[in-house]
Amino acid sequence: MARILIVGASLGGLLAANMLLRDGHDVQVIEKAQGSLDGRGAGIVTHAALSVALARAGADMNAALGVHVESRVALNADGTEAARAHMPQVLTSWSRLYALLSQAFPAERVHAGATAQRVTQSAEGVNLELDCGLSRQGSALRGDSLQGDLLIASDGLRSAIRGQLAPAAVPQYAGYVAWRGVCDEAVLSAHTLSTVFDRFGFGLPAGEQLIGYPVAGLNNTTVRGQRRWNFVWYRPAAPEVLQDLLTDDDGVHHPLGIAPNRMRADHVRAMREAARKLLAPQFAEIIDCTAQPFVQPIFDVTSTHLAFDRVALMGDAAFVARPHVGMGVTKAAEDAMALSDSIRAFGATAAAFKNYESTRLPAGRAVVQRARDLGAYLESQVNAVPAQRDADEVLRDTAVDVGALQISAASRHATKPTEALPH
């Protein structure tokens, strides 16, 4: 049995932690946030590989994963249909997946309120230096460091571990932002409910793009009337506009992302006004009825290495792809399965992480490039005349499962263990 440290208790970290614990390892998870991470409302598009990974991680697969939709629809600015496609899919939420994965992992193995500072290595293992702040509540830590045989960094876009080991792999702004939010089903009109709520919806104003779909509501309920509609509205934003969007009322600038409760009211008001002018009335109503919309700058992160002897990067710590492919969590799930496979095949050694890298490096590059291809249209609008996209093409190409299958296929050349997966 190996002692494996995982930095980050978000979805990717919990997927890897559950799989490796079920493989018989002593897994310890380090999370800088205090307490539970539940309560996030972001929507997530599911793919086949994600369901496989959840089962392998021990999640309760008898529980409802999300909301099933049968079709996609694009709406014109006047609210009429521009295109429709029959594309069944299950849409879930960050909160729902977090609940399933955290229920499967022992709480005493999560060290909350501990920030990873620095990792050092030797032939025997790794040492992770921590800043535990003023409180150790809920943590079993007895010092300011943890030792293990391996360390997996799943600490996201702002990864401290990536910053130490691969400082050149920094987030690159794509030239546009996403306004996001979730709206309660119960507050919407009958017209909006009947024309778009139960579908994967698209709005395509010139030079922009909105997508949205139903997700579980409060307490992860999927009961009709209690669900929510998750929207993502992509809008070009030159660097000086982004600077202003990410500056709060106190004049503090948040370069990699601003918390929803720090958004300036004038920015939210201007966004709602633009929605009324540019989007179908159904979408404008949803945005008007959303209590706390927020803005997300769109970044790319591309790594040239994922393995650093006994340390490996996974999830958004390794690659960040734009949301158009709907692959963020599925990519992390495939990373977790590849890590488990490699450690089974090569033991808790640097060789396991080299094998993992050979598997997931081309896959990560492929998903980032696919997302760039889909987002190039938006990126080009900052200094160009806004263009109109073909609605049928957008419905066909955005967040489709075939992308996951193609990307997975790109990684199948690496050595695979023959041991059967746990059931």
Image (cartoon, helix red, strand yellow):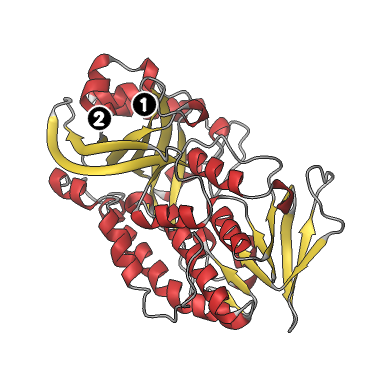
Residue tagged by mark 1? 287
Q: Indicate the quadrant where residue 247 lies.
A: top right
Q: Is there CB contact under 8 Å for labels 1 and 2?
A: yes
Q: Give residue 158's position: percent from left, percent from top.
A: 58, 56
**Is 218 situated above or below 252?**
above
Q: Position of residue 382 (x, y in %)?
A: 31, 49
Nearest the eye: 206 or 196: 196
Q: Residue at x 41, y 67 (%)?
A: 364
Determine which quarter of the picture holds residue 197: top left
The amino acid type found where label 1 is placed reads Ile
Q: Which residue is mark 2?
A: 279
Classify mark 1: residues with Cα within 10 Å, few (<14), some (14-19) or many (20+).
many
Quadrant that contains the N terminus:
bottom right
Residue lying at the far right of the rendered structure: 142
At which x and y percent is residue 337?
A: 48, 65
Q: Could one spot residue 31 in this view of the protein?
A: yes
Circle 1 SS class: helix
Disc 2 secondary structure class:
loop
Using the image, determine if residue 415 lies above or below residue 265: below
Q: Earlier in the sequence, mark 1 or mark 2?
A: 2
How packed mark 2 is, by other alpha carbons closer than 10 Å (few <14, some 14-19, many 20 or more), is many
Height in image: 55 above or below 411?
above
- Identify which residue is drawn at 31% across, 28% down: 275
Closer to the camera in the image, 53 or 358: 53
